[in-house]
Amino acid sequence: MANPSILILPGDGIGPEVMAEVRKIIDWLGTRGIAFDVQEGLIGGASYDAFGVPLSDETLTRAQAVDAVLLGAVGSPKYDGVEYSKRPEAGLLRIRKEMDLYANLRPAQCFEALADFSSLKRDVVSGLDIVIVRELTSGVYFGEPRGIIDDNEGGRIGINTQRYTTNEIRRIARSAFEMARRRNGRVCSMEKANVMESGVLWREEVTKIGAEEYPDVALSHMYADNGLMQLVRNPKQFDVIVTDNLFGDLLSDAAAMLTGSLGMLPSASLGAPMANGRPKALYEPVHGSAPDIAGQGKANPIATILSFAMALRYSFDLGGEADRLERAVERVLADGLRTADLMGPEGGSPISTAEMGDAIIAALDASL
Ligand code: NAD
């Protein structure tokens, strides 16, 4: 059988620097007989400079053909004057849309050594490991009608429409239930069924899919406003949270901050299963291209490395290797090694991007 395939799109700013550390891990796995066919391509400003567009059709075709796409980050002030459709960020929006990546997965995992970075008390976040599954391609950000119209009485009306079809709800529900089966077997669905019909439909459909297809997964429901309160009060009560585009936008950003640093946060966006059963998938850190530190060896590569761990788990069924990689990261942090963004008020000497990658490889070696 052919090796699983990966397209790496490093992008701009710190993207290539952090992705170089993921390459080290891919090579390390190769030495242990876990081989991938790896290609590389351009996106964002790097693609604009080479082809005049932030995502070429050829790169998109390759992205659609591989088992998983790994993306660094896009964007640079250099392109501020470029027309909107050709800006680096437009390349990212296009690839997500064309691949129809409707499920956005944002884990919030608190590494013991970094528990003091959270804005919450250590005992509230210590050991935290939850995932928010956010619907990404529908809901109020896309629903029609939308716009700003005159009310014919001298005022104006701003309109957006929250709209979900049964199929859109069912497919995101399945993503969440599948995720829960690989984790601790619990899904909490969040909406506002008390005040929104789209929430009533959401609750009915999620309940139906749960009962018919995933009776082994424990399903609960919460109104999203209470859900956000619970997330900051006692986040460890959750395993997988599934929610719509708007509520997911808020809930996932709040959950991210439970764990502290932007340089630590991975994400995955998944679409429909392909012919080989794997979901269409794009893995990327939550952070951007960090132009302020680009090219200086200061970037923390852990968010991108943890995104690759998600690829191992969700695209390649290599959960054991994903666990090993996450434990290696934990080990390095427990040993006190820190990039500049993880230095606490007590200070110390930070290590470089490449040194962090090397330390994680050494911890992987030690795990064998
Ligand atoms: P940013 O995430 O790039 O940076 C915010 C701050 O966090 C900066 O101070 C940066 O130095 C720091 N930071 C981010 N990642 C880090 C890491 N891995 N290690 C250490 N420090 C890190 O957000 P921004 O400054 O608002 O945006 C910069 C550019 O990135 C813009 O062009 C924006 O459009 C783009 N952007 C891209 C994505 C993406 O590619 N998914 C996401 C957000 C922003």
Image (cartoon, grey):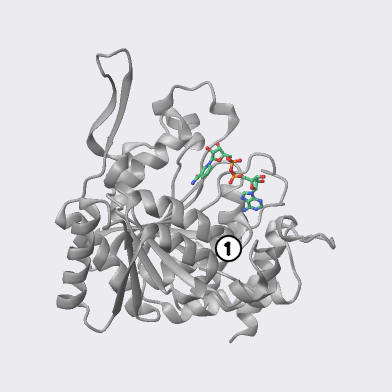
Quarter of image, res 343: bottom right
Image point 26% across, 19% down: which residue? 151
| Number of numbered discs visible in the structure rendering | 1
Quarter of image, res 176: bottom left
State whether residue 271 appears in this view.
yes
Q: Secondary structure at mark 1?
A: helix
Crowding at label 1, few (<14), some or many (≥20) Cα neighbours within 10 Å? many
* Closer to the camera in the image, 3 or 134: 134
- Measuring from the top left, give residue 325's x and y in whole percent: 55, 75
The residue labelled by disc 1 is 258
- Measuring from the top left, give residue 70's x and y in whole percent: 44, 56
Q: Quadrant of ligand 1?
A: top right
* Closer to the camera in the image, 224 or 16: 224
- Measuring from the top left, give residue 337's x and y in whole percent: 75, 69
Give the position of the N terminus as an image quadrant: bottom left
Image point 44% across, 22% down: which residue? 83
Image point 65% across, 57% down: which residue? 300
Image point 51% across, 70% down: which residue? 235
Q: Is residue 184 above or below residue 245?
A: below
Give the position of the C terminus as an image quadrant: bottom right
Q: Is residue 26 above or below residue 48?
A: below
Mark 1 CB near ligand 1 (8 Å cut): no
List the single residue furthest toward the front.
153
- Measuring from the top left, give residue 25's x and y in whole percent: 55, 68
> In the image, is 169 to the left or to the right of 82?
left
Q: Amino acid at mark 1?
A: Leu
State whether residue 284 appears in this view.
no
